[in-house]
Image: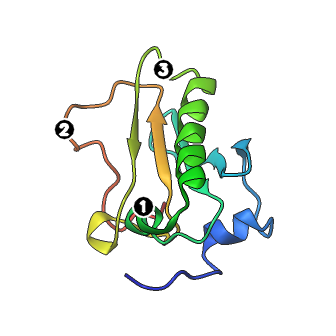
Amino acid sequence: MSAYDRNNVFARILRGELPCKKVYEDEFALAFHDINPLAPVHVLVIPKGEYVSQADFGATAPPEMMTGFWRAVSKVARDLGLESEGYRIVANHGPNGGQLVFHFHIHIFGGRQMSHGMRSMPKPGREE
């Protein structure tokens, strides 16, 4: 996996250089609506740190960052009203996993019935 690129789109959003439709922010995470939603609710949650992937995050983030980030993911889903009907969270890892932006992030999908299979997932080559 490549080194962290400080000019990736999510790093630029975190620095306020690019706009986003913010849903939630705290010291650990920023959540915002995806610009190309694949479900009625499609929100991205990104940690406030330079983490290329889930593997990088899991290996190098301090415990308080890990806890704070995953609590933010749960809070966002709850605040969006997704808990009662359910939702899907996805993290793509690396090129073969469909990762296009190499800043670790979680997709939260909700607002409709998801299939039990992965057929309803984004197609390769589609920007996140």
Number of marks drawn: 3
Q: Quadrant of residue 79?
A: top right
Q: Earlier in the sequence, mark 2 or mark 3?
A: 3
Q: Which mark is residue 58?
A: 1
Pointers 2 and 1 in contact (CB under 8 A)?
no
Amino acid type at mark 1: Gly
Q: CA distance from mark 2 to mark 3?
A: 20 Å
Q: Secondary structure at mark 2?
A: loop
Out of 15 and 111, give the one closest to the viewer.
15
Q: Is residue 59 visible in this depiction of the protein?
A: yes
Reading the image, the residue beneath label 2 is 117
Q: Residues within 10 Å of mark 3 (few under 14, many from 20)?
A: some
Furthest-top residue in this view = 84
Q: Residue at x 80, y 65 (%)?
A: 16
Reading the image, the residue beneath label 3 is 83
Instruction: Name the mark nearer the viewer: 3 or 1.
Output: 1
